[in-house]
Image (tube, coloured by chain):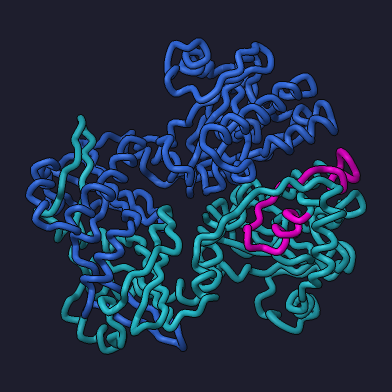
Chain colours: A cyan, B blue
Amino acid sequence: MSEEISDVSNCNNHSTKKRKLNVEQGTNDVALDLSSQQEETSIHLKSHLNLSAIKFVRILNDLPQSKSVFIEGLYNEEKVVVIFEKTPFSEELVKQILKTTDNSLQQHFHNDVYGNYTTFPNPELNGVKTTIIHPATEKHIEKYSAQQSCIIEESAEDYNNITLPYIQSKQFSIDWVYNILEHKSETERIVFEDPDPVTGFILLPDLKWNGEQLSDLYLVAICHKRDIKSLRDLNGQHLPLLKNIKEKGKKAIIDKYNINASKLRIYVHYQPSYYHFHVHFTALYDAPGCRVERAHLLDSIIDNIELVDDYYQKCRLSFIVRTNDDLFDKYEEAKDR
Amino acid sequence: MSEEISDVSNCNNHSTKKRKLNVEQGTNDVALDLSSQQEETSIHLKSHLNLSAIKFVRILNDLPQSKSVFIEGLYNEEKVVVIFEKTPFSEELVKQILKTTDNSLQQHFHNDVYGNYTTFPNPELNGVKTTIIHPATEKHIEKYSAQQSCIIEESAEDYNNITLPYIQSKQFSIDWVYNILEHKSETERIVFEDPDPVTGFILLPDLKWNGEQLSDLYLVAICHKRDIKSLRDLNGQHLPLLKNIKEKGKKAIIDKYNINASKLRIYVHYQPSYYHFHVHFTALYDAPGCRVERAHLLDSIIDNIELVDDYYQKCRLSFIVRTNDDLFDKYEEAKDR
């Protein structure tokens, strides 16, 4: 489920930032000082769309944990996707809700010191972030629809017979990675570089992170070596690389962001989203892709290889695929054989 | 961060269920048929508390991902904890918001087919789940305050010198586990039992799951053997137990809930929340404790032991502790020595 969330947040990266801005500068300001609403309205244009003119067709996806919902609708006979997402609280918003909500507290139960209620804040204190895609194509509909996922248990044999030929046939472009390594792009974003061609790497903030607050700190170390596709290729000869990334990556982050090493989760994805070896460094928050079926702690990887040199050429690796992913089809075809 | 969420959801398990009820039966009904609001009000008593009489003191914790916030306040000179949590959408709610929201769409930006807005639904369509603890003790304040966590890298030596003595000194009561195994309680909740004293186990829904929808399916297999404290105790002699739990647990869940095996995540926690060996079976949702630093896939555990009989007596295991946890103190003390 959070795969979808992360996907959506990636796609809507700029709108997420925009949302934060709205909550901090928009809705709250309206709430705090109604006289400034005129000004707000002149900055934020009134929409040419009318929500009530959109005909509900169906729910495409519902993410109760993040309190968001993806809807297919019709507007003037054209398809439209509407995304509602409830917004986080802020201190100012909370103060206003406490101040202005008096008689609307609805009690559901009360037991000893614990009471459960529903509060109905004024609408301007409780805006809902709304994204409208209009006209929406079938691609949009598919992108925002709930995706079925399943776990694949990949044996060493499966890797060689199914996954590896798939990766090779796809020849995913990773020019953007080479651009970083060759200092052709994102040079100003580099936090640290060890230029050694064998054990070296470039460390930079992940695109999912705005590089500011530590709560969702997220950096990536991309190695200079170009022949390691993924975890499956690692063996004893890569121990110096792995240990170097761990130690120097950690040190660079501690130095720059002034945090404690015990606040860092250092891990590798399998399957990765691109087949050039890289390591994730995140704060201990619920980062996208930190669940057990995708993330492998760098410490465990080092341990496993020290214990058994060709551990990752032998072991089973479980990973999640979406059922509309080509790799899922390859595994289904293999089953039928 | 979601550690705190999961903790709160555990603590408020009954109130979470209550919330679902509210959204499904309460707020929505009010929304759909305003004439029934009288009835609702008579079922849900008006509160004796008044939000506006609560004086804001400070934010204890803020969980933007789940759109919830924990507040310390003062009510009649007494401490009070207020928890606001935005509620998920439902199909009926979405239909009502689309129908009734017309002129209040505030546009933030518009680019090609993408538009970003804030919508201000009618208050009765956008209630906020509110929990009030009054009077609140210091324990309550602490429980709902943001908790610092950190990762501990536990070597085999650390386990023997720090973690194991800690576990033994605490002598956590697991009578409730023995009550289940001895059929003294929760017998009606048992989904499957293999009574074998060496390889057998009892499978039942986890308390976090209401046992209904598959989206957050969560069952636990508790083994009959009483001498396995955790992952650290497992070795080659336990392979028949592990494989039995995997195969029979999976089959029982597939038979009863009619789902595909590839929709199941099967894993073990380290540290566990109680020191009697048990295995988690969840759907592929963002279950509490499924992140890489706490969850270990049963498949990988079996693989590792098959590869190296005493793998779990040798390897490093990383886990997260809260800085107010006794175990954290033990590790801090050990550092100082």
Q: Is residue B329 above or below residue A61?
A: above
Residue B152 appearing in the image: no
Report the residue at 68% width, 13% height from top.
B198
Q: Find the residue positioned furthest to the front.
A: A336
Examine the structure image and report whether residue A325 is included in the region drawn in magenta: yes
Q: Is residue B29 above or below residue B316?
A: below
Report the residue at 79% width, 43% height from top.
A316
Residue A201: x %, y % from top left: 79, 66
| B189 with respect to A246 (left or right) | left
Residue A251: x %, y % from top left: 70, 58
| B123 with respect to B313 (left or right) | left
Residue A247: x %, y % from top left: 76, 54
* Quarter where residue B282 is shown: top right
Q: Is residue B264 above or below residue B123?
A: above
Report the residue at 51% width, 36% height from top.
B257
Residue B59: x %, y % from top left: 32, 52
| B99 with respect to A163 (left or right) | left
Residue B149 appearing in the image: yes
Q: Is residue A181 above or below residue B240?
A: below
Name the residue nearer the viewer: B204 or B134: B204
Chain part drawn in magenta: A306-333
* Quarter where residue B297 is shown: top right
* Quarter where residue A226 is shown: bottom right
Report the residue at 25% width, 51% height from top.
B57
